[in-house]
Amino acid sequence: MTSRPSTADLRRRLAHVRWIAGGAGAGKSTVTRALAERHDVLVYDGDRAELGYVHRCDPLRQPYLWALLRTPIEDRWASRTAEEIFHAMPSLHGETFGFVLDDLLALPADRPVLVDDFRTLPREVAPLVRRPEQAVFLLPAPEFRARALGARFADPARARANWGDGDHTVALAKRLARDRLWDEEVRRQARELGLPVLPVDGSRSAAELAVELAAMFQLVT
């Protein structure tokens, strides 16, 4: 395995990257699409990229991800509490960020890249940005997230793909509780590291948020 560049080298090579992370259901992908429609940028979709992590997972370097991939879908949710699910998240232990870095380094650097990735934490981004405004963490209000995820998993096929054949109402409740814990961790890290957090409650449209982020990211139309 080749060694990864130093932090200083990564900061230089990823100076064109802008990070959009935070909590699930905050509208990160919607805002990213709005930005991409108006600006000459590339988009790194963390959810799509995750499919490729599976084939690069190593039991020694990514033990939490390795264990998760070998756990039946039903057991990932039905047999554990929200706290246990949170503490078993591979991204909480930094296991997925190396994949993100490798992918970004392989992309062209001739234009800004927007990283849309739920899994990225402030402590991972902070050493790589030249100024705090190269990253933002969107955190949804509880009611906003409940509506968003309720609509997302109203489709039984989609819910079954995520949670198996167990009680989807119970699984959704655990998912919401786990995501609250993730939000708390993101908020704590961002506050300690001086990175911006953007609350999302539905009072502003995705287009309005995109305008704010375009200015923050210094994107050129």
Image (cartoon, rainbow, N blue to C red):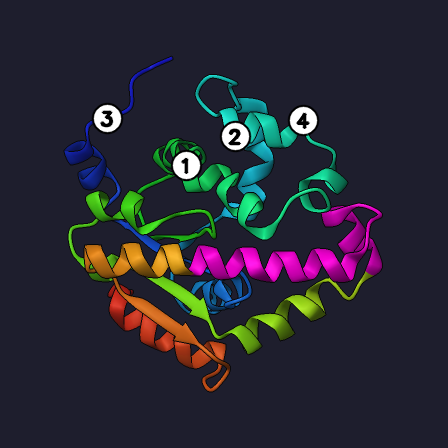
Distance Cα–Cα, label 1 vs label 4: 18 Å
Quick one: 62 or 116, which is closer to the camera? 62
Q: Quick one: label 1 or label 4, which is nearer the N terminus?
A: 4
Quick check: is 173 in the magenta stretch?
yes
The amino acid pointed to by label 1 is: His
Quick check: is 18 in the magenta stretch?
no
Looking at the image, do the residues carrying marks 3 and 2 touch, with CB atoms under 8 Å apart? Answer: no
Distance Cα–Cα, label 1 vs label 3: 20 Å
What residue is shown with label 2?
64
Question: Which SS class for mark 4?
Answer: loop
Q: Is residue 185 left or right of residue 203?
A: left
The disc at residue 5 is 3
What residue is shown with label 4?
70
The amino acid pointed to by label 4 is: Arg
Distance Cα–Cα, label 4 vs label 2: 10 Å
Looking at the image, do the residues carrying marks 1 and 2 touch, with CB atoms under 8 Å apart? Answer: yes
* Disc 1 versus disc 3: nearer the observer: 1
The amino acid pointed to by label 2 is: Tyr
The amino acid pointed to by label 3 is: Pro
Quick one: 186 or 219, which is closer to the camera? 186
Q: Quick one: label 4 or label 2, which is nearer the N terminus?
A: 2
Q: Is residue 35 above or below residue 131?
A: below
Task: Categorize mark 1 by other alpha carbons within 10 Å: few (<14), some (14-19), many (20+).
Answer: some
Q: In the image, what residue occupies the spot 40% across and 76% down? A: 209
Task: Categorize mark 3 by other alpha carbons within 10 Å: few (<14), some (14-19), many (20+).
Answer: few
Specify start and end residues of the magenta stretch as a single range. 156-183
